[in-house]
Image (cartoon, helix red, strand yellow):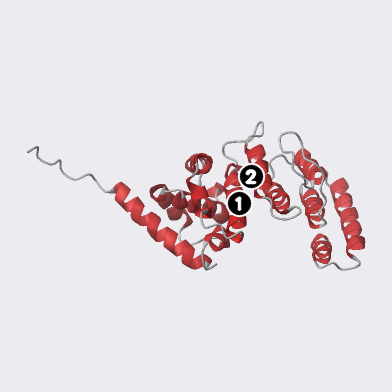
Amino acid sequence: AVERACRAAANDVPQAHVLGRRAAELCAEAAAASPGDPVPYLGRLALAAGFDERVEGPESCPVPGPWHAFRDLWRVDPANREGCHRMLAAVGTAAGPSPAAAQLFAASIVGSVGLSGLSPLQLLPLYALVIAYEYRKAQRDALAHLMWSTDAARTEMARGWNWFTSTSKDDWLVVDLSHLAHALVAGGRSDLAADVFQALGPYGATKPWASVSSTGDAVEEFTRARTTALSAGARRREPPGPPRAVP
């Protein structure tokens, strides 16, 4: 019901709001039947985003978005990964692309009191960086690629690397590792990215590779970055040569 209503809203179907109200009623009924289950709240958040519900955010993130639904979800399941990613997409595209809003939201999440250093949400700022890159690329900004060399980007790469080295394969998703691997390569740390690519194996998510590719070819971009990283990683592990004789 939620997906149907959101599709109707996206396509300006006349009955969209009727479908949306019915889907919201079903979400409320499901939440009442199972108060601790985040799924109905995720549905409500999807509806709010799909129907472009926007209210001003809190002081820590004063950007418009579906905050009522997000707060309800947070109360039931704090730091829900899917919910935070849905919210990132919502604030990053509200009333047109808004990379600054996306980055502010991501920063507010990683700065949340009590967020575990092992949470995959530690990587959320890397997703926000891709949103910002997509925006600048769409504006034909020839210097967009330099954003990966900023101090702010390096800080988020370090955060992501710390998360990676503190977690295990049971905590990893292909899409998260893909964002981390790309950031490290783009930020000049291909040697570290090698370990992430080793963890990924032959797998990669469509994003961010399609977004950052000049041709939109995700496979080509993934393969190029992987080759670069594995070569850098091999050089890092090479034993040092014998010392040179002093003339």
Point out residue 197 in the picture as x, y percentages from the top left corner: 44, 55
Q: Please identify the quadrant where the C terminus is shown.
A: top left
Identify the residue shown where x is 76% and y is 54%: 95
* Residue denoted by label 2: 103
Q: x%, y% of residue 245?
A: 9, 40
> Considering the image in quadrants, where does the N terminus appear?
bottom right
Instruction: Give the distance between the C-alpha atoms of the residues marked 2 and 1, in whole angstroms.
Output: 8 Å
Tell me the kind of residue under disc 1: Ala
Which residue sits furthest top?
113
- In the rendered image, residue 115, in percent from the top left (x then y), is placed at 64, 35
Which amino acid type is marked by label 2? Gln
Q: Is residue 62 above or below residue 142?
A: above
Is residue 42 left or right of 243 when viewed as pictured?
right
Whichever of labels 2 and 1 marks the residue nearer the N terminus, that label is 2
The residue under the point 38% across, 57% down is: 228
Residue at mark 1:
132
Q: Position of residue 162 (x, y in %)?
A: 49, 39
Circles 2 and 1, Cβ within 8 Å, touching? The answer is yes
Tell whether 54 sits left or right of 192: right
Give the number of marks. Answer: 2
Callout 2: SS: helix
